[in-house]
Image: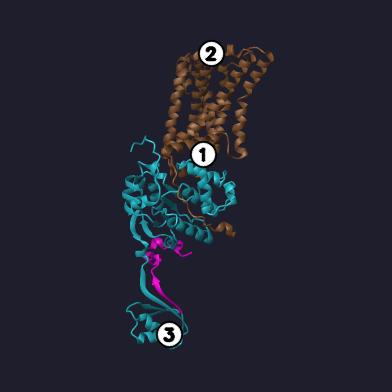
């Protein structure tokens, strides 16, 4: 600070701000946009981009593979059916959440920036909500884009896009509906876990465990407990829930022999279940931010 | 005020409004953490100005600041800032309030420019205005080329400047500064205080500033609020607290004892304190007598000044504030 230009304050006169103050809604929107950029590491250092961008590319690989096959065969060949897609990438989606969520909420706790947010034009729950919306949007993007790529690619491969659209247009709402629930569920669980601690490593492991471990335990308990009691355990296993709701949205038949087929619950149960879990997580998240000391 | 309602596009322009309003009004404001009472039934009314908040560590200064921001919920009582109910109109109020926390609060991997612009938007400024004001504000606090660098490499002084900038960028009507000189070296401290004083006077922004250093409060503030163990001890204008004492200090080049004797001959009560003579100021002719005596004795007058009470003297009877960190820097 011996540099005189640093130490001195230039006399440039202070300008009052007489323009618009857009208030709480604008603050929430600005935080949402900022956080959504942060999900993909945009506007941050290169190293913060590697994780999310890398995983976003990985979820596209099955779609690219399918398109390659379809293009070579130049006819409608379904190596990967759309209702199977999320099952293929579910672990990657969770990994994405496990990488991104701790950064999204843990960082502000680590650096004590929360007190600056909470002393501005928003409420604590607005902060939590904006963060959730940002993560859910990011998750939705990487969930739906591969489906969209596959749909368009398959359509172009058969040389009759119009006909393909007529036959398969129902895949679009099915893919979107299931993707929305999937993203909400994963974002809800992931963010709520990540908000509990400023430590990135803990929340990353916690999120992975919450999905992978819980689903594995759900599968074992189902086998051990037998169908009648065991099938309700599946409603607490994230991967069973996501698969169940996806097949319901696509109105597709489950492969016989799979646990979901044996459980034989109405598909809509999984969709309702996912919605309830996501909402419950959102409530936990809001409560966490109601209590957290900034 | 419904909680669900979003704030309107408030256009509160000019400084005139805040001067019409009571800056802060609290009634029975209490905050307990379990069994510990951090703030105990505080009744306070403050008009605009530069207000110093003093008290020992743990006296409740930070708690009060956080309550006024709505960062903490009170256990009981009311708080109003610039006419807004802090706890029901938080977002609306905080568009016009800036806060500089005591602790570190900056992310490491973004630049000061990006960070401050983002914070301006969260205070409700449109994107373009946020950018314009960020550039201007960072210049005001004295941050130049380094504002484009990631903040991880910043010195304590630079970080304090960024912290001040994010509290100023949205042109608030009130700034709450919690120990703003923490961790600064004497020169940095000096610059920070000068800047704060300037914000309070030239920029016309009301300031509530907490410090455990009386010398800082004395230098910058024009009103003092003292809190001890969560209770209000006093809230008084600085002019009352450090009023002239009526004691003249005389220092001469030569034998002070001669002068003391001469003055006593004229019936003036004189005390000696080292090289200095202390004289109770009374009567219109005292200064003439002093001058004439010095001339007669052929002494050189080095100093003749009216004593002012220092804040420290005021607090000396209170051991809680008599820590070593109350000494002048």
> Which of the 4 quarters of the picture holds residue A74?
top right
Gap between marks 2 and 1 measured at Cα = 39 Å
Magenta range is: B302-329
Comparing B161 with B277, the one in front is: B161
Observer-side mark, 3 or 1, equals: 3
Comparing B196 with B265, the one in front is: B196
> Does residue A181 appear in this view?
yes
Q: Quadrant of the N terminus of chain A?
A: bottom right
Residue B22 image position (x, y, % from top left): 33, 51
Q: Is residue B326 magenta?
A: yes
Classify 10 Å Cα crowding around label 1: few (below 14), some (14-19), many (20 and above): many
Image point (60%, 25%), residue name: A59
Looking at the image, residue B19 lies above or below residue B277: above
Dot 3 corresponds to which residue? B294
Instruction: Check the residue under mark 1 and report the chain it is in.
Output: A
Instruction: Check the residue under mark 2 and report the chain it is in.
Output: A
Judging from the image, what secondary structure is the residue with disc 3 in?
A: helix
Q: Which mark is residue A254?
A: 2
Which chain is drawn using brown? A
Judging from the image, what secondary structure is the residue with disc 2 in?
A: loop
């Amino acid at each position: 600070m011996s540099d005189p230009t640093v130490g001195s304050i230039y006399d440039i006169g202070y300008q009052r701000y007489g323009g618009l103050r857009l208030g709480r809604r604008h603050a929430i929107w600005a935080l949402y946009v900022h956080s959504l950029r942060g999900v993909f590491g945009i506007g941050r250092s290169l190293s913060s981009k590697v994780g999310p961008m890398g995983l976003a590319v990985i979820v596209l690989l099955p779609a690219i593979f399918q398109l390659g096959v379809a293009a070579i065969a130049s006819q409608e060949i379904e190596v990967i059916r759309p209702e199977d897609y999320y099952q293929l990438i579910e672990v990657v989606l969770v990994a994405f959440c496990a990488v991104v969520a701790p950064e999204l909420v843990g960082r502000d706790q680590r650096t004590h920036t929360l007190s600056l947010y909470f002393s501005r034009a928003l409420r604590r729950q607005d902060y939590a909500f904006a963060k959730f919306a940002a993560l859910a949007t990011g998750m939705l993007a990487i969930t739906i884009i591969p489906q969209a790529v596959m749909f368009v690619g398959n359509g172009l491969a058969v040389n009759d896009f119009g006909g393909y659209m007529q036959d398969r247009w129902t895949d679009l709402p099915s893919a979107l509906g299931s993707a929305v629930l999937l993203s909400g569920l994963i974002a809800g669980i992931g963010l709520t876990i990540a908000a509990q601690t400023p430590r990135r490593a803990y929340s990353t492991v916690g999120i992975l465990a919450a999905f992978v471990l819980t689903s594995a335990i759900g599968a074992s308990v189902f086998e051990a407990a037998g169908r009648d009691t065991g099938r309700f355990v599946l409603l607490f296993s994230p991967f069973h829930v996501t698969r169940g709701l996806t097949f319901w949205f696509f109105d597709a038949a489950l492969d016989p022999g799979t646990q979901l087929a044996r459980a034989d619950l109405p598909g809509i149960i999984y969709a309702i279940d996912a919605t309830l879990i996501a909402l419950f997580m959102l409530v936990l998240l809001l409560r966490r931010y109601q209590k957290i000391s900034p | 005020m419904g909680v669900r309602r979003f704030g309107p596009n408030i256009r509160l322009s000019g400084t005139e409004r805040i001067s019409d309003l009571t800056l802060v009004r609290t009634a029975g404001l209490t905050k307990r953490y379990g069994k510990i009472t951090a703030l105990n039934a505080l009744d306070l009314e403050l008009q605009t100005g530069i207000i110093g908040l003093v008290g020992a560590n743990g006296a409740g200064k930070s708690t009060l600041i956080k309550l006024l921001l709505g960062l903490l919920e009170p256990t009981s009582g009311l708080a109003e800032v610039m006419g807004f109910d802090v706890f029901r109109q938080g977002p609306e109020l905080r568009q016009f309030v800036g806060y500089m926390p005591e602790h570190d609060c900056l992310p490491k991997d973004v630049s000061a420019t990006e960070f401050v612009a983002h914070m301006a938007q969260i205070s409700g400024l449109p994107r373009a205005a946020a950018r314009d004001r960020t550039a201007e504000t960072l210049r005001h606090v004295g941050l130049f080329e380094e504002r484009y660098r990631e903040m991880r490499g910043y010195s304590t002084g630079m970080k304090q400047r960024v912290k001040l900038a994010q509290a100023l960028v949205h042109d608030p009507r009130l700034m709450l500064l919690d120990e703003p000189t923490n961790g600064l070296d004497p020169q940095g401290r000096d610059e920070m205080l000068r800047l704060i004083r300037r914000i309070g006077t030239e920029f016309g922004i009301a300031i509530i500033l907490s410090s455990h250093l009386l010398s800082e409060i004395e230098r910058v503030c024009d009103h003092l609020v003292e809190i001890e163990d969560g209770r209000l001890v006093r809230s008084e204008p600085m002019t009352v607290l450090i009023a002239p004492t009526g004691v003249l200090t005389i220092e001469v080049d030569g034998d002070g004892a001669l002068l003391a004797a001469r003055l006593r001959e004229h019936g003036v009560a004189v005390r000696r304190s080292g090289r200095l003579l202390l004289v109770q100021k009374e009567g219109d002719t005292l200064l003439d007598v002093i001058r004439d005596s010095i001339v007669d004795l052929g002494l050189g007058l080095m100093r003749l000044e009216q004593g002012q009470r220092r804040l420290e003297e005021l607090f000396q009877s209170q051991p809680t504030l008599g820590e070593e960190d109350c000494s002048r820097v």
